[in-house]
Image: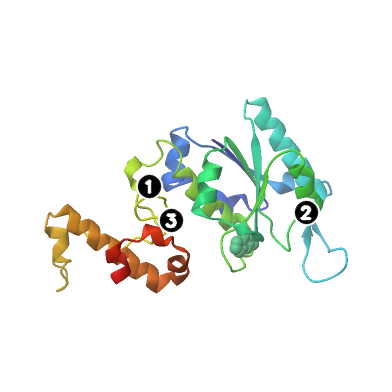
Amino acid sequence: MRLDVVTIFPEYLEPLNVSLVGKARARGQLNVHVHELRTWAYDRHNTVDDTPYGGGPGMVMKTEPWGEALDSVLADGYETGSRAPALIVPTPSGRPFTQELAVELSGRPWLIFAPARYEGIDRRVTDEYAARMPVYEVSIGDYVLAGGEAAVLVVTEAVARLLPGVLGNAESHRDDSFAPGAMAGLLEGPVYTKPPLWRGRDIPDVLLSGHHGKIARWRRDEALKRTAANRPDLIERCDPKGLDKKDREM
Ligand code: 6GU
C-alpha cells in the first residue's frame, strides 16, 4: 500500500517511523511519503491560508497550494505504478472513523491524506478531487483537534495493522473490540499474565482451570459487563440474536 501525507508539519508524522507502522515500512509492506505543503505555496511568504469569504474567525487553507500539491503527488504515484488513489480528509465534520471503515481503507492500494490546520480547506479542493477519486472525510471522535495530523496517525495505524503480514499473528485480529466474530459488538474484557500473585492481587481462578468452555464463558461475561459499563450504546445496538440465554441473565 502507498500512503502520501501532505502537511504543513511534516515533523508531526515522525511517529510513522516507529513501531508497527515503522516496521511495516521497513519490510516494504507500506510505502509512505510525507510532503511539506509549503513546497507548493507560490508567494515569498509561503502563504497557505487566507481569511474566509463571508467573514468569521480563523483562516481557511487556500485552493492553489493544495491543488498543486495533490496534482504533484498524483503524478508521482501514477508514474511509479500506483493506481486507484483515494483522498482522505480528516475533519471533525467528517463521517465517524470506525473499524469497518479501517477495513475498507485497508483494501485500497493508495491513500492520500490531506490534513488541514485552521478552519479547514477551501471546499473547492475536495469537490475538484471528488470528481476523480473517492474522497473520505473522516472524524476520529467528537472533540476538536488543532489539526488533522494526529488523525492521520490514528487512521494509518488502524489501517496498517490490518494489512496482510503486518501483525505477527493473524489471530490477533479475531477478538479485537469492534471486530466481527463471536464477540461481535462487544469490548474486550480484562487480561492477565504472570506472576499469578502481585501485591496481594491474584487472577481469576477460571483462567487457571484449563477448562476452555468455562474460560470462553467467563471472557464473554466480562466483555458484556465492560461493554455495559463503558459503552451502553453498543449493548442497545447489539443484535438480540447474537445473545445467548446466559448473556441475557447477565
Ligand atoms: Cl479528523 N480533525 C480535527 N481537526 N479535529 C478532529 C478530528 C479530525 N476528528 C475529531 N476531531
Question: Residue visible at 64% across and 30% down?
Answer: 83
Q: Which circle, 2 or 3, is nearer the viewer? A: 3
Quarter occupied by residue 222? bottom left
Q: Observer-nearest residue: 65 or 87? A: 87
For the residues marked 2 and 3, what is the alpha-carbon distance in whole angstroms? 38 Å
75 sits to left or right of 165: right
Q: Is residue 113 above or below residue 143?
A: above
Question: Residue visible at 43% across and 56% down?
Answer: 178
**Residue behind mark 3:** 178
Mark 2 close to ligand 1, CB under 8 Å: no
107 sits to left or right of 47: left
For the residues marked 3 and 1, what is the alpha-carbon distance in whole angstroms? 10 Å
Q: Observer-nearest residue: 118 or 182? A: 182
The mark nearer the N terminus, 3 or 1, is 1
**Residue behind mark 1:** 173
In which quadrant of the rendered image does the C terminus lie?
Answer: bottom left
Q: Which circle, 3 or 1, is nearer the viewer? A: 3
Residue 48, numbered label: 2
Task: Judge the density around disc 2: few (<14), some (14-19), many (≥20) Cα neighbours within 10 Å.
Answer: many
